[in-house]
Image (cartoon, rainbow, N blue to C red):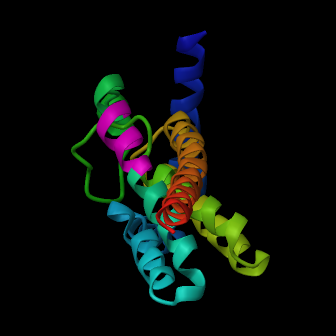
């Protein structure tokens, strides 16, 4: 069963390389994937949300979700699973971006993208939230397109990111409750 899954994973990447990659899409996908490098686009959006008081709570939730994603995806799971990148396992696969040096599973790009985007989707007006989700999907897909992640890396990163989005909301809500409770006791 695991071998079948690995074959499907690899087959999808080779299909994208052979049938989908093209000179028009390549620079677009490289740009999209670079937006997710180190979670930069999500950090910038989070900082922008932290500035106005009206959206500060959402910015805090996004920041907590991003931190949780960093911890679970990039620090814990990547090192526990230690899955090699697809271009190291498949000679025929040629990445079109600089080869990342860390492990492949789960995708940090997908994790941070879905961690922040799901908070934004649930907490911002739907028009803005939908754009955040679309960007998360595009960044995640771009990791397959450029040849640096398996589909299961993306799926796992996205699932962990979604869980982290709820963790981010929970942490901020809990902190608010504790603050309110302590203010009531002081009075």
Residue at (63% x, 69% y) in the render: 120
Q: Is residue 141 visible?
A: no
Rendered position, 91 above or below 118: above
Q: Main secondary structure of the magenta part?
A: helix
Q: Is residue 40 magenta?
A: no
Rendered position, 179 above or below 9: below
Q: Is residue 9 left or right of residue 64?
A: right
Residue at (53% x, 41% y) in the render: 160
The residue sitting at the right extreme is 126
Rendered position, 127 above or below 160: below
Residue stretch in magenta: 68-77
Instruction: Using the image as rendered, state which of residue 125 and residue 8 is in the foreground.
Output: 125
Q: Is residue 69 magenta?
A: yes
Query: Which quadrant of the view contains residue 38?
Result: bottom left
The residue sitting at the top extreme is 1
What is the x, y in percent for residue 116? 54, 62
Q: Is residue 100 left or right of residue 137?
A: left
Please give the count of numbered marks on the rendered protein: 0
The residue sitting at the front extreme is 187
Residue at (57% x, 46% y) in the render: 158
What is the x, y in percent for residue 162? 60, 48
What is the x, y in percent for residue 128? 69, 79
What is the x, y in percent for residue 30? 42, 68
Residue at (52% x, 41% y) in the render: 13
Q: Is residue 60 left or right of residue 177?
A: left
Instruction: Using the image as rendered, state which of residue 181 and residue 5 is in the foreground.
Output: 181
Query: Which quadrant of the view contains residue 83?
Result: top left
Instruction: Using the image as rendered, state which of residue 5 and residue 173 is in the foreground.
Output: 173
Q: Is residue 174 visible?
A: yes
Figure quadrant of the N terminus: top right
The residue sitting at the bottom extreme is 52
Instruction: Using the image as rendered, state which of residue 81 and residue 56 is in the foreground.
Output: 56
């Amino acid at each position: 069963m695991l071998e079948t899954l690995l074959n499907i994973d690899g087959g999808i990447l080779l299909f994208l390389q052979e049938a989908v990659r093209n000179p028009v899409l390549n620079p677009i996908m490289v740009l999209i994937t670079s937006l997710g490098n180190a979670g930069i686009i999500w950090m910038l959006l989070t900082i922008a949300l932290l500035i106005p008081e009206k959206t500060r709570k959402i910015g805090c939730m996004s920041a907590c979700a991003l931190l949780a994603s960093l911890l679970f995806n990039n620090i814990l799971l990547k090192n526990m699973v230690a899955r090699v990148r697809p271009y190291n396992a498949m000679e025929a696969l040629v990445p079109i971006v600089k080869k990342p040096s860390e492990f492949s599973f789960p995708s940090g790009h997908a994790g941070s993208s879905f961690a922040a985007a799901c908070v934004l989707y649930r907490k911002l007006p739907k028009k803005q939230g939908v754009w955040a989700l679309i960007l998360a999907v595009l960044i995640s897909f771009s990791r397959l397109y450029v040849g640096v992640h398996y589909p299961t890396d993306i799926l796992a990163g996205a699932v962990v990111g979604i869980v982290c989005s709820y963790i981010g909301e929970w942490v901020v809500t809990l902190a608010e409750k504790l603050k309110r409770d302590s203010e009531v006791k002081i009075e």
